Image: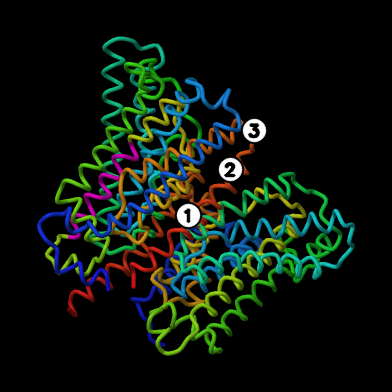
Amino acid sequence: MDQDMEKPAAAPRPASLFRRRDALLSSAMTRLFLLTLLIFVVMAALDPSRFLTLGNFSSMAFQFPEFAILSLAMMLSMMTGGIDLSIVGISNLSAVVAALLLSSLAGPDATGLAAAGTVGLAIMAALLVGGICGLLNGLMIGIFGLPPILATLGSGLVFTGVAVAITGGSAVLGFPAAFAFLGNGAVFGLPVPLIVFVAIAATVWLVLERTALGLRIQMLGTNPLAARFAGIDDLAVTVRTYLLSGLFSAAAGLVIMSRANSAKADYGSSYLLLSILICVLGGINPYGGFGRVAGLVLAVLSLQFLSSGLNMLQVSNFAKDLIWGGLLLAVMVANGIQFGRKSR
Amino acid sequence: MKIDWTRNETLVFLVVVAFCILTTVVDPAFFSLPTLFDLLRNSIVTGIFAIGVLVVLVSGGIDVSFTAIAAFAMYSTTLALKNLGLDVPWYGAFALSILIGTGLGLVNAIFIAGFRLPTLIVTLGTLSAVRGFLLTFVGSQLISNVPPGMREFSQLILFRGTTAEGYFYSLPWAFAALVLVVAGTWFLLYRTLLGRKIFAIGGSEESARRIGIGVRGVQVFIYAYVGALSGLAGIIHASLARVANPFDLVGLELSVIAAVVLGGARLTGGYGTITGTLLGLALIVLVSNSLILLGIPSTWQSVVIGALILLGTGLPAFQAKRAALRAG
């Protein structure tokens, strides 16, 4: 009922179209903010001498950007009502291509202009690979009408498979020292991965809140049929969405590769579930239509606080799987009542 | 008999036949009874999973948690029997594992039928949670000395023989479990009212509700049934291997879903056949076991499976889209 009232009012100003939704969202956002704060306070109270240190915050700022960037990639596809299961495959394939370029053209001993040139070339190549992968996803979904979940499941297997095939399944090593800057360096005390994340998050915010593409993504996700009748070129929107998702995945792949100082076809395989969890936790509707960058950032922070805290308490990685899975279900149950009311 | 070329089954059948012919040409040793029995043995566990996934897909849902449920059921069954020192026959172990699987399936059902949450996200959550619980609280050590009942089961041979060249081949009784599951699920889907309800929900949940189908009840049954099948597949896996490894099985889920989808089942629900699923299963088992005979290194395996998914689902989706455009 809610939706039917809103649709005819599809006024030129995006802000008014989504105001009612924002009101609903803000209550979920308040809850999320409180959850983040709660996790922070609990973790800080459990072990203040280690949690509340500059070293801990700095190490967290180096850790979360890689999966936060992947979550931004997932967020875009989810907002159109789709899903991108190939993000980890794309990030590893782009990283492997960049790694092969770096190790064969420059090698670990390269310095100066040669190293800088190769690093630039490798980054371009990785983004190109990510863009092509995303473009393929978008075309398969938009032109051939494949359900996003199947298209990206299949393409994810292909991307990972190609990465396995060209490396023989082993890690690629031996980069110029300059490349480590991307994952481990700092500018004015700010970690470079954090800067990359902030830049991409700002881009996503700009696209979603300030461009026609963002409005179209939200309309397509809310109701694809209505969006088509409203004259939206759904092919163009889909292709651009998955293209951006591919580019962001490649960026995440570069950060992971720089931090690990190697690239391998099966790095970050747990990040797929994690990025879906972050999106759902951050209030992005898995049926499409709405979501905000601020929610995603809060979700990332709360999970990083939880993860660092659990590490300090020496909780095993398996227990983390249990906690993340349980959290995903709990958050869905808490938000589900809202999603349910919307779809009526 | 008229051959319908637009059906997935026909396409997959032709690909399977072509694959076999090509492999035989490259390596004549492929075309033999030992190979056939190897492939049949390798398809038991995947096959039971695939039938479960088919039922979920027909109902319009998706389940990725079945491998974690299977690992949980088989490992905790083995551990319980060992720790309690119970000397139960194999069917006792099977019953316990199926029971545990059903219980975990009901957990999925609570979230899906009770809270009406999207099936993919629920089962992703339970996949992670069930596996985390198993490895944290039940155990992460491999049990290589399985209870005697399970060992006996692995020695029950349905059929054995020797080729002219002196190669042995055999088929364990476990294969009968796959046959039973296939026959039982066929009966369920095509000969019972419950089966028609599953198709109806997959076709359109809202319409199913309006003609008076208790959608939630049917969903509870579906996820409990898949849980039970997972428990069965898990215990068969551990019995045949004579090892209960809690790290086994998880990771298989995507290729099982691939097999079912290749067989023509639609993710949107309401459509899927047992024949198609078995053909898809045959293709996936062939690709994962015999690709190397074609001279394609095993590192290319997931590229081939991924490409098959894209082609196998892309062609029908494209045809459907063109047909819809022509009609409207």
Same chain for the residues under marks 3 and 1 in the image: yes
Residue of label 2: A320
Compared to residue B64, the image places residue A162 above or below, namely: above
**Label placed on residue A331:** 1
Secondary element under disc 2, as helix, strand or loop, is helix
Q: Main secondary structure of the magenta part?
A: helix
Of labels 2 and 1, earlier in sequence is 2
In the rendered image, residue A284, in percent from the top left (x then y), is placed at 35, 53
The structure residue drawn at horizontal position 26% and vertical position 63%, both measured from the top left corner, is A222
Examine the rendering and report whether any part of residue B166 can be seen.
no
Quadrant hosting residue B182? bottom right
Which span of residues is magenta-colored?
A: A234-250
Name the subunit of mark 1.
A
Distance between mark 3 and mark 1 Cα atoms: 25 Å
Image depth: mark 2 or mark 1 in front = 1
Name the subunit of mark 2.
A
- Left or right of B47 in this view: A185: left
- Three-letter residue code for mark 3: Gln
- Three-letter residue code for mark 1: Val
Q: Is the Cβ of the residue at disc 2 closer than 8 Å to that at disc 1?
A: no
- Left or right of B15 in this view: B253: right
Same chain for the residues under marks 2 and 3 in the image: yes
In the rendered image, residue B190, in percent from the top left (x then y), is placed at 52, 86
> How many numbered circles are shown?
3
From this viewpoint, which residue is outermost toward the top? A112
Residue of label 3: A314
In the rendered image, residue B130, in percent from the top left (x then y), is placed at 62, 54
Image depth: mark 3 or mark 1 in front = 1
Secondary element under disc 3, as helix, strand or loop, is loop
From this viewpoint, which residue is outermost toward the left? A12
Distance between mark 2 and mark 1 Cα atoms: 16 Å
The structure residue drawn at horizontal position 47% and vertical position 39%, both measured from the top left corner, is A268
